[in-house]
């Protein structure tokens, strides 16, 4: 069948009992047919030949690893909505009057990252409006204005939960997520409430109740619309028996007292409160509840620039079947290649190094391509 989108293009093909559909003109005609044929036959698609239109690639055709730019958005002390970045979650300057660190305006930065080749952009709303997210007009406007000119998936997190406003009116997490989707978000990210939902699931002998934000939103909008953000920190122990959570033995690090084993404690409330569950346990639980993706942070590495916590990323990405986004610690293009080579993560995210132009998205992707890691150039 064909579709008219500023011109007629092929939108679906059928062979036997297999039907393939796509809605992007840039993948239509010879390009789309070649892609579908490669998928159905299992044969490697030759690139840049036979008029397919594909650019030359140095790696086999496979799912590309994604590079994501993250914008922590909050109101500063003057009431302006700005992009900020913390060191181990502290977003204020270390000197002077300790103002909120201002790294730019959210809409402008989002446009910049789209033009530089980011595969996705994530907004984390850390303003006081989280208490009444449906009244957060500045953040909703950021999404609306960004979605007008930015054509990669937009994720928004912060305040995706049930709440009651000052007038006693109750709103579900689904109500909040729906407003974000209507404003231009493609995905919502759930943080603390996801940890609480995982705890409830395990307390309930692994039986979902259908009441959690994850379950409600994924049922209504699909799993692909639900990202769970996990904020763990490393806890050292002498032996695996010292914790009820999954422990690992890092190859190159030891604890402050020579401990050889550790587990990753999940936190809530922006890293201020530790919980009894580990990142491994929460990841497995939220996948069962219906999460479609995991954004895996690491408090220990946040803002350090020394690289992703490979032990943590591999622990979680090998435990679940849904995509895992590695976050926290990136300081160079090499760190992206490293995490993609050493773990099973599907994407990697950075914030401060992009905001401050210390590292560009283009340089990250060039390094990945040079290291034969599939990426969208």
Image (cartoon, grey):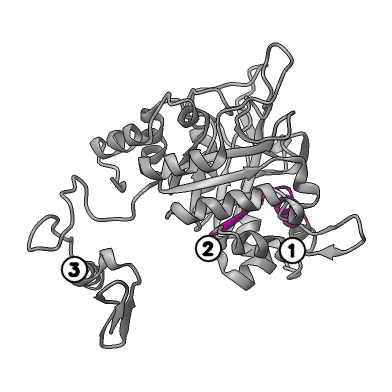
Is there CB contact under 8 Å for labels 3 and 2?
Answer: no
Contact? badges 3 and 1 (CB < 8 Å): no
Residue that carries the numbered disc 3 in the rendered image: 34
Q: CA distance from mark 1 to mark 2?
A: 16 Å
List x then y, in percent, for residue 36. 24, 71
Task: Please give the name of the residue rendered at 78% of the width and 64% of the height, measured from the top-left corner.
Answer: 172
Q: Mark 3 or mark 1, which is nearer to you?
A: 3
Look at the image and tell me whether residue 283 can be seen. no
Residue linked to disc 2: 224
Q: Residue furthest top?
A: 96
Q: Is residue 93 magenta?
A: no
Give 126 or 292, whichever is nearer the viewer: 126
**For marks 3 and 2 on the same chain, the one whose residue lies earlier in the sequence:** 3
Q: Which residue is mark 1?
A: 212
Residue at position x 33%, y 55% from top? 63
> First in sequence: mark 1 or mark 2?
1
Identify the magenta region. Answer: 186-199
């Amino acid at each position: 069948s064909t579709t008219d989108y500023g011109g007629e293009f092929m939108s679906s093909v059928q062979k036997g009992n297999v039907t393939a559909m796509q809605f992007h003109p840039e993948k239509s005609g010879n390009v789309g047919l070649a892609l579908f044929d490669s998928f159905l036959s299992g044969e490697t698609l030759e690139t840049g030949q036979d008029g397919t239109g594909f650019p030359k690639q140095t790696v086999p055709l496979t799912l590309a690893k994604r590079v994501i730019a993250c914008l922590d958005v909050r109101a500063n002390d003057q009431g302006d909505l700005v992009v900020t970045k913390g060191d181990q979650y502290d977003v204020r300057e270390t000197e002077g009057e300790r103002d909120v660190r201002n790294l730019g305006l959210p809409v402008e930065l989002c446009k910049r990252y789209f033009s530089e080749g980011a595969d996705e952009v994530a907004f984390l709303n850390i303003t006081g409006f989280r208490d009444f997210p449906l009244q957060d007009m500045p953040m909703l406007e950021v999404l609306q204005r960004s979605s007008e000119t930015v054509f990669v998936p937009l994720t928004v997190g912060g305040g995706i939960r049930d709440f009651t406003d000052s007038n006693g009116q109750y709103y579900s997490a689904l109500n909040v997520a729906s407003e974000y989707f209507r404003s231009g978000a493609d995905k919502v990210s759930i943080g603390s409430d996801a940890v609480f939902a995982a705890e409830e699931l395990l307390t309930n002998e692994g039986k979902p109740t259908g009441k959690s934000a994850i379950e409600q939103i994924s049922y209504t909008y699909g799993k692909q619309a639900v990202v769970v953000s996990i904020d763990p920190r490393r806890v050292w122990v002498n032996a695996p028996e010292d914790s009820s959570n999954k422990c690992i033995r890092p190859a190159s690090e030891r604890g402050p007292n020579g401990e050889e084993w550790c587990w990753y404690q999940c936190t809530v409330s922006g890293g201020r409160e530790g919980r009894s569950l580990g990142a491994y346990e929460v990841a497995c639980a939220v996948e069962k509840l219906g999460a479609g993706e995991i954004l895996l942070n690491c408090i220990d590495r946040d803002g350090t620039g020394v690289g992703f916590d490979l032990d943590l990323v591999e622990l979680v990405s090998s435990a679940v079947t849904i995509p895992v986004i590695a976050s926290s610690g990136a300081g160079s293009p090499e760190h992206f290649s490293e995490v993609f080579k050493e773990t099973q993560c599907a994407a990697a995210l950075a914030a401060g190094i992009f905001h401050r132009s210390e590292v560009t998205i283009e340089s990250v992707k060039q390094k990945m391509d040079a290291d034969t890691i599939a990426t969208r150039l």
